[in-house]
Image (cartoon, rainbow, N blue to C red):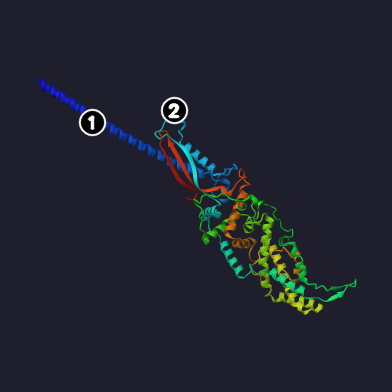
């Protein structure tokens, strides 16, 4: 009986020993599993929080867009100097790291209580590895933003009219017919014909004067088109810009090609034209808060002053109007007859019949010139001039032509195009890249006039960026997240 009880006790102790070992091994495995699950959960929490912080931080960077650029030109871009004059992407990297670190930091209560979280994350580093600036790819980035803004706008009918006017002008040859060159060739023919001579009071032989009425008109050409057309009647801006300080005349900062493509359709180009007229001033519609007042004229010609740009536009108008007016006057029997009568009278007195035809044409050329100056004066005064003249819209008679400077600025032709319509045609004829380049100058000129933006540079205006945020935990885990953010993503 005693031995049997001892065996039972021994067997029971042995079973209990096995259970303890099994339980110990099981608990170890369970604890390892729990710790593994906890570590996995903690790593997942770190990754999730990093994702959230990256989203907040990178959107915070985009929220720092230049307010003046948005208000004036409706463009969303981050100017990376932030008004400091120090243009560098490292400024934006510092902002990104600061936003990330603030979002990882403990709350004020947590800091007071020294409470720790299961993640214990801090921002180890933040950098920007890819960029896209406004001027990249010849301004493609800028145009992409403009189109994103303009696609919500209805297209003005005036733009389609401008395209039709441009087509008619080109088909009529007004943009290729150089009337002044024709007039010079005609004058050379006149000068090559010898005139009769007389003996003057001093006993010297001299050539008889032709007394061509066209000479009185031609003698005014040296004054300059704009001076002739304006004649002190209209106030011209004296604004000037040192173009060496602006985008088109300096080496520009470039991005990494992150998002710098913009393929333009015909409709896109029409929208860009509408944007120019919406955001830029011109003669007769100047903007108060702008450096150059005639900005659309600057888009066309790129000169460094309002006077020079308006003068170039006046010269273009003269080229077109002379071609148009000559085309009409050659079909007007009354005007051709008046020129023939004057030429016949002059050559009959001098008895040089071979001069009759070239003198007639010299009068017609001079008449076309005088009428063209009248047209330009009407346009600058806010009146209308049709692309093609008629008897009803012609302004100067024969005798008025001789004193044309005294017959300017008297109303309009009663129908036709305004100055802005001719300017639209000229702008359509200007190369797309030239307009984009000059628009960037205008943006810099105007934004630099606003408070805190005196060193603004459009080639440091960030549109899209690739940000990398590296985080580390107090227990040694490290991870990195990379995202691309932009205003149109």
- Residue 360 higher or lower than 10, as above or below: below
Which is more toward the observer, 475 or 216? 475
Which is more toward the observer, 160 or 301? 301
Q: Is residue 450 left or right of residue 140?
A: right
Picture coordinates of residue 406 (x, y %)? Answer: 76, 64
Q: Is residue 196 left or right of residue 381?
A: right
- Judge depth for marks 1 and 2 and give the one in front: 1
Q: Is residue 333 left or right of residue 128?
A: right
Which is more toward the observer, 445 or 247? 247
Disc sitting over residue 113 in the figure: 2
Picture coordinates of residue 202 (x, y %)? Answer: 90, 71
Q: Residue furthest right?
A: 202
Location of residue 327 (image quadrant): bottom right
Q: Residue furthest left?
A: 1
SS at badge 2 = helix
- Residue 81 higher or lower than 427, as above or below: above
SS at badge 1 = helix
Q: Residue furthest top?
A: 2
Location of residue 435 (image quadrant): bottom right
Q: Examine the rendering and report whether any part of residue 414 can be seen.
A: no
Q: Examine the rendering and report whether any part of residue 6 can be seen.
A: yes
The number of callouts visible is 2
Few, some or many residues within 10 Å of mark 2 (<14, 14–19, 20+):
few
Q: Which residue is mark 1?
A: 22
Disc sitting over residue 445 in the figure: none
Few, some or many residues within 10 Å of mark 1 (<14, 14–19, 20+):
few
Picture coordinates of residue 121 (x, y %)? Answer: 43, 36
Q: Earlier in the sequence, mark 1 or mark 2?
A: 1
Quadrant where the N terminus sits is: top left
How far separated are the C-alphas under marks 1 and 2? 42 Å
């Amino acid at each position: 009986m005693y031995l049997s009880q001892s065996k039972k006790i021994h067997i029971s102790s042995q079973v209990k020993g096995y259970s303890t070992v099994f339980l110990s091994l099981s608990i170890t495995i369970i604890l390892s599993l729990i710790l593994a699950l906890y570590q996995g959960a903690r790593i997942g929490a770190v990754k999730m929080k990093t994702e959230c912080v990256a989203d907040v931080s990178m959107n915070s960077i985009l929220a720092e867009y230049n307010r003046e650029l948005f208000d004036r030109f409706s463009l969303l871009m981050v100017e990376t100097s932030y008004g400091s004059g120090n243009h560098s992407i490292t400024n934006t990297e510092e902002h990104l790291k600061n936003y990330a670190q603030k979002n990882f930091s403990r709350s004020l209560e947590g800091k007071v209580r020294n409470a720790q979280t299961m993640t214990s994350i801090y921002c180890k580093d933040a950098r920007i590895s890819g960029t896209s600036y406004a001027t990249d790819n010849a301004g493609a980035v800028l145009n992409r933003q403009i189109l994103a803004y303009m696609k919500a706008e209805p297209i003005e009918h005036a733009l389609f009219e401008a395209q039709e006017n441009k087509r008619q002008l080109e088909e009529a040859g007004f943009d290729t017919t150089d009337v002044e060159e024709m007039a010079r060739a005609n004058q050379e023919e006149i000068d090559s014909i010898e005139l009769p001579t007389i003996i003057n009071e001093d006993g010297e032989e001299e050539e008889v004067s032709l007394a061509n009425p066209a000479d009185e008109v031609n003698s005014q050409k040296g004054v300059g088109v704009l001076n002739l057309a304006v004649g002190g009647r209209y106030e011209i801006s004296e604004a000037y810009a040192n173009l060496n300080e602006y985008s088109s005349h300096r080496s520009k900062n470039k991005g990494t090609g992150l998002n710098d493509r913009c393929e333009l359709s015909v409709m896109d180009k029409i929208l860009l034209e509408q944007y120019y007229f919406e955001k830029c001033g011109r003669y007769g519609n100047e903007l108060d808060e702008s450096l150059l007042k005639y900005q659309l004229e600057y888009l066309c010609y790129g000169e460094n002053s309002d006077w020079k740009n308006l003068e170039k536009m006046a010269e273009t108008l003269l080229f077109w109007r002379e071609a148009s007016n000559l085309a009409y006057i050659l079909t007007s029997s009354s005007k051709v007859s008046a020129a023939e009568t004057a030429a016949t009278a002059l050559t009959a007195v001098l008895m040089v019949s071979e001069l009759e035809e070239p003198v007639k044409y010299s009068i017609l050329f001079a008449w076309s010139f005088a009428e063209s100056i009248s047209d330009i004066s009407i346009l600058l005064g806010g009146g209308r001039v049709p692309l093609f003249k008629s008897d009803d819209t012609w302004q100067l008679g024969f005798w008025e032509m001789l004193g044309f400077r005294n017959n300017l600025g008297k109303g309009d032709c009663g129908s036709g195009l305004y100055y802005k319509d001719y300017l639209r045609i000229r702008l359509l004829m200007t190369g797309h890249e030239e307009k984009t380049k000059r628009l960037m100058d205008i943006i810099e000129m105007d934004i630099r006039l606003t408070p805190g933006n005196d060193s603004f540079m459009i080639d440091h205006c960030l549109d899209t960026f690739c940000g990398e945020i590296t985080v580390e935990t107090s227990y040694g885990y490290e991870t990195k997240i990379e995202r691309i953010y932009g205003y149109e993503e």
